[in-house]
Image (spheres, grey):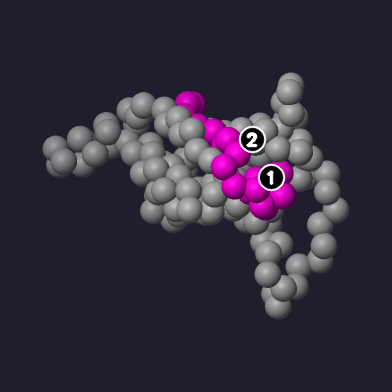
Amino acid sequence: MNSHRTSSAAATAAPRPVELKLVSDPATLAGARKQIETFAAACGFSQRAVEEIGLCVNEAMANVIRHAYAGRTGRPVHVGARFEGGRIVVTIRDWGNGVDPSKVPQRPYDPLEPGGVGLMCLKRWLDEITYVPQPGGGMLTTMIRRRG
């Protein structure tokens, strides 16, 4: 009984926010995803939600590398996560081309063609996602998932 109370109390305490300063390189995706998944688990999200949040971060970062930076490596990508009001807020800041992905026409999904599922996952597994062009170039992507 006490262990239940302890784990419940731990799940409601907000862990320290995460701030990652990375570069645009596919090799950084797994580590960033793991750190955000660890943070989401510490915030009390279910294992399924943790995995979905992690996949959303992975897909959003892959899209930054692929589209905002046109595949160029070594460019800055800042990832942050905080827990507030029963929700996880993940931000991804890039200094790429500043194109809002929500405004780009999506090609019809073809399971035989690679790609095309990232934005579908984001829309399905997040409660909110916004893209805000930044002064000086680039984009701030904010992804929100409520707990429960």
Give yes or no for contact between labels 1 and 2 (Cβ–Cβ under 8 Å): yes
- At mark 2, the secondary structure is strand
Who is closer to the viewer here, 13 or 68?
68
Label 1: which residue? 69
Left or right: where does residue 76 sit relative to residue 108?
left
Q: Is residue 107 above or below residue 42?
A: below
Left or right: where does residue 53 sit relative to residue 47?
right
Residue 116 rendering spot, x and y as whole percentages: 71, 62
Residue occupying the far left of the picture: 2
The mark closer to the camera, 1 or 2, is 1
Label 2: which residue? 94
Residue 127: image quadrant is top right
Task: Check if residue 75 falls in the magenta segment.
Answer: yes
Residue 118 rendering spot, x and y as whole percentages: 65, 56
Quadrant containing the N terminus in the rendered view: top left
Left or right: where does residue 25 sit relative to residue 42?
right
Who is closer to the viewer here, 83 or 58?
58
Residue at the image point whose x is 66% and y is 39% from the top: 129
- Magenta residues (range): 64-85
Residue 59 rendering spot, x and y as whole percentages: 59, 53
The amino acid on which the numbered mark 2 sits, given as a three-letter code, is Asp
Q: Is residue 144 visible?
A: no
The amino acid on which the numbered mark 1 sits, given as a three-letter code, is Tyr
Q: Residues within 10 Å of mark 1 (few under 14, many from 20)?
A: many
Q: Is residue 91 visible?
A: yes
Who is closer to the viewer here, 122 or 32?
32
